[in-house]
Structures are given as structure tokens and as C-alpha cells.
Image: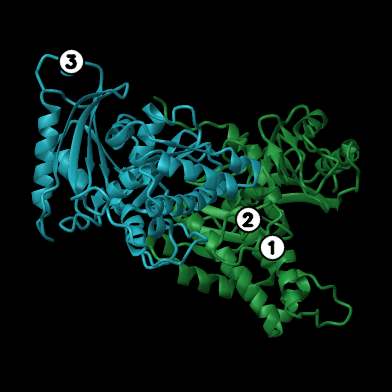
Chain colours: A cyan, B green
Amino acid sequence: MTRGNTVTDAAPCALAVDIGGTKLAAALVGADGEVLRRAETPTPPAPAGQGALVAGALVELAVRVAGPARPAAVGIACAGPLDLAAGTASPVNIPAWRAFPLRDALATAFPDAACVLVGDAIAAAVGEYWRGAGQDARSLLGIVVSTGIGGGFVLDGRAFAGPTGNAGHIGHVPTDLEPVPCACGATGCVEALASGPSMVRWATAQGWRATRPGAQADAKALAEDARGGHAVALAAFDRAADALACGIVSAAALADLDLVVVGGGVAAAGPVLFEPLRAHIERRASLDFVRRVRAVPGVLGRDAGLIGAARCALLAEAPVSVHVASPA
Amino acid sequence: MTRGNTVTDAAPCALAVDIGGTKLAAALVGADGEVLRRAETPTPPAPAGQGALVAGALVELAVRVAGPARPAAVGIACAGPLDLAAGTASPVNIPAWRAFPLRDALATAFPDAACVLVGDAIAAAVGEYWRGAGQDARSLLGIVVSTGIGGGFVLDGRAFAGPTGNAGHIGHVPTDLEPVPCACGATGCVEALASGPSMVRWATAQGWRATRPGAQADAKALAEDARGGHAVALAAFDRAADALACGIVSAAALADLDLVVVGGGVAAAGPVLFEPLRAHIERRASLDFVRRVRAVPGVLGRDAGLIGAARCALLAEAPVSVHVASPA
């Protein structure tokens, strides 16, 4: 965070923020996608009505990371639901924000910068497409498997957010597995079977307890035990992989995908997820154009959303509001 | 087909052809989407290796419909699979064409026109978007329910064909219904449950026989009986509608759709399909942005593909080859 580095007088750079229920992250990102500076802070707990508390922490972090730089653009990746037209956010995990004017909060702090709001999963997909595992793809779906399951498309080289900004919601695609009740109200959704908590719930019901003394019974411990060969933990990953594969095959049949990039905490489990995932895709996919889809881990980790938000901002592109119909 | 009408000296018009396993259709379409002239002919049966027979009939029909007009563009809607980059077609129902150079065949006959090849279901979706039931939508899926089930997207006002030209294949999205074997090799696909022949197979297995004397046991007779209150026929439509609804909810969660336009022979059944379809979507869709999707019948009938192909041609736009990434 020293002055006088390449940041202050350099080519256009963007400030990116990534807002989730547990942490706020910010980064200064160069025009080539390099993360020049980065910091994060826990999301302050705040009750309904106290949205300014969270916004204050976010702006403080953003200003600190920007330092002396004058970012040309601010990219704001945020958990949904969002209203991209209004620039507001109502993240499920941040009860203090309901239709919170997030874009305005950043625009006030950075009045000279173009501020662009984008869903966090779409931002992550754009990041991996631009500088990560998806650089060779034309059409990809980025999936974030964590406490929930989010997703975002880059189609024909362009972030596709849809009219309401919610495109890519693979977590709520129906599967042909057990009709497990989902938080959304439906049953058998990908998320109801493949999110971290769903996996842990199922494994626990099958008698799994974290092997390592003192370990919490969470997705990380489940992955640890799966890597150690624990039968129930392996079965939990296989079942989650099957549900993910079902959703991926649906998405590939509909969107003619080259690639699926899977990130998030659960994806960090590695081969215990990706090996059964590829096997289930192979078994389920039948048509040639569906069979060509590859599933790979993300390579940008927790920076994917920041880098993607920076990209969207540098393009001054709020995906939902850019109408790309060909000229008549 | 008289000379001297508004066609010959009018504003730019397009010639459109729509190629299926049973019929070839051609139309001269004005810049505003009006069908100025139209004709069709049965697809000549031709064995493998005799592709020129089919192409000859197609070109003869196209030249006849064009008459004295000099179309600025030729739009070619064809059943898949296609290779849009190569301009070739290998329609499942036309065994004489395997990697047949379809675009070149039309380009030879119309050397001054831009020739654009597009999947028939995508063409139908574009037609309904441009001049039919989808004019108010930003993102729609057109579905053709017939002997098979095809689909095509218009996303953010633009035909989305995907890298291989196969996007929109809702017929091969998995459902959570019975794992009925599908022609594609997978099980439980939308098409395996909701195509005309699938519905007839199921109804027949439940004891249904066409009520009207002399009627063939086909989807049309099944619709007739459903409208007459036949319990098994009604159950067959309900089951097909449930499978379609499952695929539509998947597509809406992924693509954030405003609208689904359902056309094709089975859709002509009317309320016996659309009433259970809407009820199953309502029951299955949970998230607000998914619940907003509406399912409506197409209004252009068998002209949808011709009008859409003309539109694509007038835009000189082969959907798959236009890279719409924002400038870096």
C-alpha cells in the first residue's frame, strides 16, 4: 500500500469490491487484470434498517484500497438478488440491505468513476473467462459451490445477466435425484443436493462424524474425510457431483457450453468432487455438442469475482442494460 | 405469383427456406416481415448419397418463389444438426444429407444474395420475437413440440445459437419424471416424455385408442380426444405438460426468461396443453424471477421459421459467427 508504485500514474485501473454475507473484499485491478492491491474485512453484522453500517465498512475498505489511485471505474460484485436497473441490492445473507442503493453508495465515494453493479457469480464467471480457467472458451458457465450454489454465463464472449440480472441460477435447476426440499420452496434443486450444507446434512444423516478430533462437521471436514477414503464422505461427494452433473447437462443442452468452471469452497475439495463430476457428466450427456462440455476448477480462487467485476467496470458494462440486438 | 407486384421493385426483401423431413417451404419476405409469396412441396424421399435430389427440389422451389424478385439475402432454416461454420446440414430426418453443403447450394442459385444458415427452431424463435407472440419480450425461448422437441433462444434481443449452433435444445434437458429412454441415448429427457410420439406411446400403453372412427392413433387424434374429455388423453397431455414445465423452469432459472413461445403440431392442441402447462410451471417455479416466465402459443404457425430465417438473413447475421464481446 505504498505510494509511488505503478498504480498512481499508471494506465486505467479499476477498483473492484466483492460483497458477501461473511466478508467484504476490495482490490485495485489493472487494465490487464492484475490485482495490484487487495484487502478484505468481515461483513459487519447489522440488523434490518442499519444498512449504512455495512455500507460504511465497505466504502472505508474501498477508499483504503484505492489509496492515491484514481480508478476510472468501480466494479461492484454482490450477492443477490440485485436490481441492476435501480442499482440496489438485497442479499439474502445481509438482512440490513433490502433494496439498498449500493451503486449510489460507491458512486458518492468515487464520483469520477463509472460504477457498475453485477451479480457475484456472474462477476466470477467473467473473471475466469478473462484471466482464469476460461480464456479459451466462447461460452462458459461459472459455478460457485459454497453454502449456496450460484452461477453466471459468459455467452459468445459476453456476460449474460438476463433481463432481471438473475441468469445462470444453476442452483435452482431441477434434478432427477431425490426430491429434497430446497430453501427456494421447490424440491430436488441442484442446491438442495450439492451445496456444502446439503452435503453435510446428508452425510450426517448417514452417520458421518468429522474424523479429525475437534473438527467441525462442515464441508471442509467432509472433504478431508473423503480424501482419506471415508465411505460416507465419498458417497456424499458422489451424490453432490451427480446433482451438479444433472444441472450442467441441462445448461449445456440449453446454452451449448464449451466449459464449466467450478469454484467456491466446496470445489476446493479437488478430485473427490471433480472425478465423480466428470464421470456423471460423461454418463448423462448423450448428444455430441453436450458431451464436449468440460468441467474444470477455477484458478482465480477468491479473486475471481473481483477481477470479473473490474473487467465489467472497465468495459463500463452493466451486463443487463446493454442491448446487443443487431441494428435493424 | 404474378409479376409487377410490390415485390420486384420494392425495398430489400429476403427469400427464406425452411427445410424439414416431410416438407420444404419457401417464402419471399419483406423487410417488415410480411410474407409476400409462399409455397411448399413434400421433401423428396432420397437415399444416402442422393442429396442432390433434395437440393434440386429445394432450389427449384426457391427460384420459383423468388420469381422476378432479386432478394438481398437468403435465409435458410434447417433441421439439425448443422455446422454453421461450414454451412452444412445433416438433418436426422433427411438421410440423404450428411454434412451436405446447403449454404453453397443456395449461394450458387442466388449469387448476389447473402446466404445465412440457421437452425429451424432458432429461426422460429426469431420469427415469433420479431413479428409474433414475442414482440414484447427481451429474452425468450421458442419451443417447437412436434415429432421431436426443438428450441431456440432470443436473449437480450439477439438470436443465441451457441458455438456449435445447438443452443436451445430443451428437448434433451433432463426432467424429474420417469426415466423413459430417449432417442438421444439418455433417459427422462423432455422429448422422451412430451413429444407427440412419446405422448401417443404412453396413452396407447394406458389403453387409449383413437375415438373417431378411422382416425390414426397420432398426436392429433389424442388432442381431439383430450378436448372431448377422454381421461387417458387428458392424462397424456398433463404428463407431457409436466415434463415441458420442468424443462421450462430449468431454462428460466438459467436464462432469466420473460417468455416461452410454444409452437409445433402438438402445441396446436390448445388449452388441453397450455392449461396444465401453466399449472405445472406455477407449481414448480419458486424464485420470483423464474415465476415471471409466461408460456404462450406461437401465433405465426408454420411461417415462424420462414419469417425468422428472413430476419436473420436481412441482418446478414449467422447467429453463431457474430462475436459480440464488448471491445476491450
Give the crowd class for mark 1: few <14, some 14-19, many >=20 residues within 10 Å.
many
Q: Are marks 3 and 1 on the same chain?
A: no
Q: Chain of mark 2?
A: B
Give the crowd class for mark 3: few <14, some 14-19, many >=20 residues within 10 Å.
few
Residue contact at pointers 1 and 2, CB within 8 angstroms: yes
Report x, y in % for residue A68. 11, 23
Q: Secondary structure at mark 3?
A: loop
**Separation (CA) of disc 1 from disc 2:** 8 Å
Does residue A182 sit above or below A54 in this rendering?
below
Residue depicted at 67% across the width and 54% down the height? B304
Give the crowd class for mark 2: few <14, some 14-19, many >=20 residues within 10 Å.
many
**Foreground label between 2 and 3:** 2
**Quadrant hosting residue A189:** bottom left
Residue contact at pointers 2 and 3, CB within 8 angstroms: no
**Quadrant hosting residue A74:** top left
**Separation (CA) of disc 3 from disc 1:** 62 Å
Residue depicted at 31% across the width and 56% down the height? A197
In the picture, measured across the screen, residue B23 lies left or right of residue A148, that is right
**Quadrant hosting residue A310:** top left
The answer, for residue B136, to whether it is visible in the render is: no
Which residue is under mark 2? B171
Report x, y in % for residue A41. 13, 40
Q: Chain of mark 1?
A: B
Does residue A137 sit above or below B79 in this rendering?
above
Quadrant of the frame with the N terminus of chain A: top left
Q: Are marks 1 and 2 on the same chain?
A: yes
Report x, y in % for residue A216. 21, 52
Query: Quick one: B159 or A284, which is closer to the camera?
Result: A284
Which residue is under mark 3? A9
Could you tell me the amino acid type at mark 3? Asp
Which residue is under mark 1? B195
Residue contact at pointers 3 and 1, CB within 8 angstroms: no
